[in-house]
């Protein structure tokens, strides 16, 4: 079993807004090993992206990571590093790719210069060497005509090509951890398939750990070994993908899986989860999912369940039923 | 279900590309390039394709929000392409649209009562304020909203609720055909299912016909009776929903279906990964539009554009290789098997037919 690359303990990131404190991430603990893909899945506003940003120390104001949170990466306590030290980690040993490649690329620099930037910064490469390495990286992520693309500006590239360029940039320094935040959500399915293949090959080839953040359960099933399901800032279920999909332990996981339209099988009415995600400023007192839960009992209304480890290695935060 | 509520013949929409200081037309984007399809009363036609294939343009053409460059849109036996004034206004009572973006498609300065009630006044369906409000209340109830929502503004609602308002607005005039342009793709999974169910309920209750435009194949499968797959402004395949998903004929449909990640870790499929990106609709490839990315192409595909032909049972495909035209086919360009693809699902075939061998993962 490979080493743990990233371990998060009791991460709490709250946003101090005018309308009150929003606990975007509230006590998340997880870990990712080398060569493994951990998927964090959940609906918008569940805190999956803020978890990723907290790891990279990129939480925007008015958000703050609270004291008592721990993020260990490759032997470093990331939250204790100075901003200067953090900059030697970010883009170097830990890299991140984002949902919308156009807004995360700088429109006034060529692709080559943007990939080369981190190589020159972290690896001390010269201009020429950085360019050569950029071409090599572009070829590695399957970019057609890398020698030409390296001198192009982002606007000249299609969505899929931009995401390839982003991946090339993220991989430039040989990271041990890749955080992919909805990497294919803006792309068409045929292009998504290409990008996923690139990420998978690179993970298997280099033993890099991947944290995949997505709302798409199909991607989780195809890409990840383990999955953490988030709801309203907390992990409600965590475990091996095959086990979780086979017999979801939390009613929310079960509801999500049931409400998905499928490509095969029956096409009767979808069993939808009623209601909406609670507003973060007025969360229910008991279990966060209780107002939407079909199995809710009296206890769920008053007492919030903890995320507990079950004998089979799965973590579920739900009161034992029956 | 007999007869045709809506029929489209040779529908085209070209957008000019202008250049230079004089704004001369220097080219054309062929967004929709010759479509033929029809919708029966009470039926859902799924229109599926990737971004840039022209599906939204089709939605707008059907409602005359855009005027076609060529072709006919025949609604209840009448060509509506040149309708104007009162006749067009009358038509819009029967044809309605639900938009993708529940945030951008509602006027933020109007209350729900005004958003839904406005058209009731315009079309003279409500005599006075009292009657109008009663009708709006009834519509809100039909889409699962409550009476006290009447006086709220769009920003006070969640995405799913806003989409319900958009649906109520579309239903207000009691239309027969509703074009839905990606109605659930901006919504979260748990809300998507609620809206999909609502659309199905309303169809049953009001005997609506839908043209359901989407990029999401799984939802199209749930919603549709028949499905047409678009690629670069053309329909490449159309069939009853079960046939299309069980036995896709066109290589593009096969690739599209195989590219959808399945939420089932126990299923390991062989996937067809297409090479390259969608070509620009301003600069279309010669011959078959799909041939630069096709994994079973023949030399002929570069020269000659295939037309939709019947593979039996209302299953149409535009491909030289599949569906009954095999006798004319020579040796495959890249030594691949062509027979194996005919009428087979992509998860069984397509393994060894990618020219660069990039087509498959997870055997």
Image: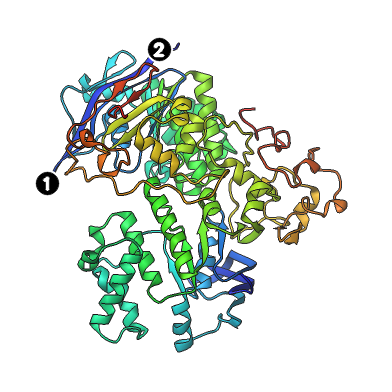
Q: How far across and down, in percent of the image, does residue A292 sit?
A: 29, 44
Decide if residue B330 is on the left or right side of residue B185: right
- Residue ID at (33%, 70%): B139
Query: Is B342 in front, or is A213?
Result: B342
In the figure, residue B81 lies in which quadrant? bottom right
| Residue A127 left/right relative to A189 | left
Which of the two labelled residues, at mark 1 and mark 2, occupies the earlier sequence position?
Answer: 2
Classify B90 as above or below B218.
below
Report the Cα–Cα distance between label 1 and label 2. Answer: 42 Å
Q: Position of residue B172 (x, y in %)?
A: 37, 74
Look at 55% across and 46% down and name the residue there: A266
Q: Which residue is mark 2?
A: A3
Which secondary structure lies at badge 2?
A: loop
Crowd tier of the residue under label 2, counting other residues whose Cα lies within 10 Å: few below 14, some 14–19, many 20 or above: few
Image quarter (top left, top right, bottom left or bottom right) of the N terminus of chain A: top left
Q: Is A301 placed left or right of A124 in the picture?
A: left
Q: Quadrant of residue B29?
A: bottom right
Which disc number belongs to residue A18? 1
Give the camera-side residue of B226 and B10. Answer: B226
Depicted B33 relative to depicted B360: above or below: below
Which residue: 75% across, 52% down? B302
**Residue farthest along the front direction in this orientation:** A322
Q: Chain of mark 2?
A: A
| Disc 1 secondary structure class | loop
Q: Position of residue A253 (x, y in %)?
A: 38, 35
């Amino acid at each position: 079993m490979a080493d743990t690359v990233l371990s998060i303990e009791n991460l709490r990131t709250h946003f101090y807004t005018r309308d009150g404190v929003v606990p975007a991430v509230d006590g998340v603990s997880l870990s990712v090993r080398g060569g493994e893909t951990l998927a964090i899945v959940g609906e918008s506003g569940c805190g999956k992206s803020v978890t990723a940003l907290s790891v990279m120390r990129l939480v925007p104001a008015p958000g703050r990571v609270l004291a008592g949170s721990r993020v260990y990466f490759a032997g470093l306590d990331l939250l204790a590093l100075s901003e200067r030290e953090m900059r030697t980690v970010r883009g170097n040993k830990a890299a991140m790719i984002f949902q919308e490649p156009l807004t995360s690329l700088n429109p006034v620099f060529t692709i080559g210069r943007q990939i080369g930037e981190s190589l020159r910064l972290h690896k001390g490469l010269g201009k020429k060497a950085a360019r050569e390495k950029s071409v090599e990286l572009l070829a590695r992520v399957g970019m057609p005509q890398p020698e030409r693309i390296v001198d192009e500006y982002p606007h000249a590239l299609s969505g899929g090509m931009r995401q390839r360029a982003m991946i090339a940039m993220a991989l430039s320094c040989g990271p041990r951890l890749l955080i992919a935040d909805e990497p294919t959500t803006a792309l068409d399915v045929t292009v998504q398939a290409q990008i996923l293949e690139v990420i998978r090959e690179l993970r298997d080839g280099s033993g890099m750990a991947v944290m995949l953040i997505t709302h798409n359960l199909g991607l989780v099933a195809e890409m990840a070994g383990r999955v953490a399901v988030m709801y309203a800032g907390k992990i409600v279920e965590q475990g091996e993908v095959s086990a979780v999909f086979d017999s979801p332990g939390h009613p929310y996981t079960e509801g999500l899986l049931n409400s998905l339209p499928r490509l095969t099988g029956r096409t009767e009415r979808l069993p939808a989860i009623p209601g909406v995600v609670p507003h973060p400023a007025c969360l229910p007192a008991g279990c966060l999912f209780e107002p939407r839960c079909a199995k809710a009992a009296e206890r769920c209304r008053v007492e919030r369940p903890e995320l507990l480890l079950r004998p089979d290695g799965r973590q579920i935060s739900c009161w034992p039923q029956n | 279900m007999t007869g045709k509520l809506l029929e489209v013949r040779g529908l085209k929409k070209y957008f000019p590309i202008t250049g230079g200081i004089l704004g001369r037309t220097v080219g054309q984007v062929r967004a929709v390039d010759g479509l033929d399809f029809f919708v029966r009363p009470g039926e859902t036609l799924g229109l599926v394709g990737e971004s840039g294939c022209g599906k939204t343009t089709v939605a707008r053409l059907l409602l005359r929000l855009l005027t076609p460059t060529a072709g006919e849109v025949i609604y209840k036996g009448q060509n509506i392409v040149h309708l104007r004034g009162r006749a067009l206004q009358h038509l819009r009572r029967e044809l309605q649209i639900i938009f993708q973006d529940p945030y951008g498609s509602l006027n933020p300065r109007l209350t729900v009562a005004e958003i839904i009630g406005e058209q009731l006044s315009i079309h003279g369906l409500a005599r006075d304020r009292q009657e109008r409000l009663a009708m709006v209340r009834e519509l809100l109830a039909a889409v699962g909203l409550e009476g006290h929502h009447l006086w709220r503004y769009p920003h006070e609602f969640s995405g799913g609720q806003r989409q319900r308002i958009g649906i109520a607005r579309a239903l207000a005039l009691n239309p027969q055909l509703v074009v839905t342009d990606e109605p659930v793709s901006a919504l979260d999974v748990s809300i998507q299912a609620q809206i999909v169910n609502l659309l199905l309920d309303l169809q049953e209750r009001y005997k609506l016909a839908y043209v359901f435009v989407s990029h999401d194949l799984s939802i199209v499968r749930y919603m549709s009776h028949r499905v047409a797959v678009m690629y670069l402004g053309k329909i490449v395949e159309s069939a009853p929903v079960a046939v299309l998903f069980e036995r896709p004929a066109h290589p593009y449909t096969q690739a599209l279906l195989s590219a959808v990640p399945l939420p089932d870790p126990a299923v390991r499929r062989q996937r067809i990964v297409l090479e390259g990106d969608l070509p620009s609709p301003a600069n279309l490839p010669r011959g078959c539009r799909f041939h630069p990315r096709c994994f079973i192409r023949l030399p002929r595909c570069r020269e000659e554009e295939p037309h939709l032909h019947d593979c039996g049972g209302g299953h149409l495909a535009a491909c030289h290789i599949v569906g009954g035209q095999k006798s004319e086919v020579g040796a495959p360009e890249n030594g691949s098997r062509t027979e194996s693809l005919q009428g087979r699902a992509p998860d069984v075939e397509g393994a060894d037919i990618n020219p660069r061998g990039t087509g498959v993962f997870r055997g």
